[in-house]
Amino acid sequence: MRLVKVLGSITSTIKDPTLKGFKILLVQCIETDLKGRQEYFVAVDTVGMGEGEIGLIVTGSTAKRTEVTKKKNVDAAIVAKVDRIDLE
């Protein structure tokens, strides 16, 4: 899993039918101190994220293992919304 921040949404009117109904988001990987890294993903939202929120994504074949992404053309999926990070 990767820790990410949602930068914004992506609109696509013409897409693979298996992506219909998904909210597609642009996310940036971040460090535990919430500083951005130069690593970005386009991910489907499975938990209802919004711009500026922190979440966890899975990529590759793991992204196809959620209840809503099974048998879908998905390579990255947001699977959790992060409420807080405790490092102590």
Image (cartoon, rainbow, N blue to C red):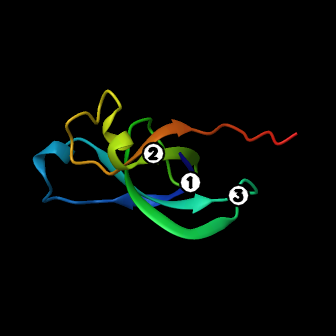
Residue 23: image location, x then y, percent: 33, 47
Tell me which label, 3 or 2, sits earlier in the chain.
3
Residue at 32% x, 27% y: name it.
Answer: 67
> Quadrant of the rendered structure where residue 45 is?
top left
Label 2: which residue? 58
Kindly report the distance in space between the C-alpha atoms of the residues bearing marks 3 and 2.
18 Å
Give whichever of discs 3 and 1 has the lower sequence position.
1
Task: Residue at the far right: name it.
Answer: 88
Sequence-first disc among 1 and 2 = 1
Secondary structure category for the residue under label 1: strand
Above or below for 10 versus 49 = below
Label 3, label 1: how far apart the Cα atoms are: 9 Å
Query: Where is residue 8, by image quadrant?
Result: bottom left
Q: Secondary structure at mark 2?
A: strand
User: Which residue carries the number 3 mark?
Assistant: 34
The three-letter code of the residue at mark 2 reads Val
